[in-house]
Amino acid sequence: MALLIEGKKQIVAEVSEIASTAFAAVVADYQGLTVEQLTALRVEARKLGVKTRIVRNTLAKRALQDTQFNILNDSLVGPTILAFSTSEDDMGAAARLFEEFAKTNKAFELKAAAFDGKVYEGAEVSVIANLPNQEKALTMLANVLQAPISKLGRLITALKEKNESEAA
């Protein structure tokens, strides 16, 4: 069924609006997946705050044209599903979602991802998927800040024990 021009404009506007506020985008080939598998992917995406969209490539190229994700145009070939990480707290959510889904669904092929003005092809998508979410990043920061203090505490304890053993 052919889309009318108004419908096409609406799709382009919706995708463009999502892309303009997103932090990362991932493109994958969904050919060979069942409706149930795609539905499961979309349900999981909603839980993670990831926006997914299946769009014709010509419409996707127009939607991404004035956004930071226009660098993905070369990847928009064949059946394509787009995912956008829209949460500032978890910028790698879309890549992580697609990477996990690809592990259990062999027909699902990661094409590319874009983050911070750089394109990551196929297997490189794991670079974005491994980005820590806000909670994990804060935990890592706390550990880094805590390490010198705990080392100083162990040093003082060791010096105290050494002084006590020499005094005895």
Image: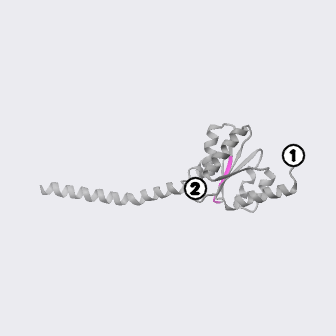
Q: Residue at x 68, y 49 (%)?
A: 112
Residue 79, given in percent of the width and then of the height, sits at 76, 44
Tell me which segment is drawn in magenta. Answer: 111-116
Can see residue 62? no
Which residue, given by chain and number where applicable, does mark 2 sit on?
Answer: 90
Instruction: Name the residue at 29% across, 56% down.
Output: 154
Q: Please determine whether, in this image, residue 44 is positioned above or below residue 32.
A: below
Q: Secondary structure of the magenta portion, mostly?
A: strand
Q: Which numbered circle lies on residue 1?
A: 1
Classify residue 144 as left or right of residue 3. Answer: left
**Residue at horizontal 62 percent and vertical 47 percent from the top:** 97
Horizontal and vertical percent position of residue 148: 36, 60
Task: Judge depth for marks 2 and 1 and give the one in front.
Answer: 1
In this picture, residue 138 sits left or right of residue 33: left
Residue 58 in view in this figure? yes
Residue 8: horizontal and vertical position, in percent?
83, 55
Few, some or many C-alpha atoms within 10 Å of disc 2 (few <14, some 14-19, many ≥20)? many
Residue 114 on the magenta span: yes
Name the secondary structure under disc 1: loop
Q: In this view, does 138 lie to the left or right of 85?
A: left
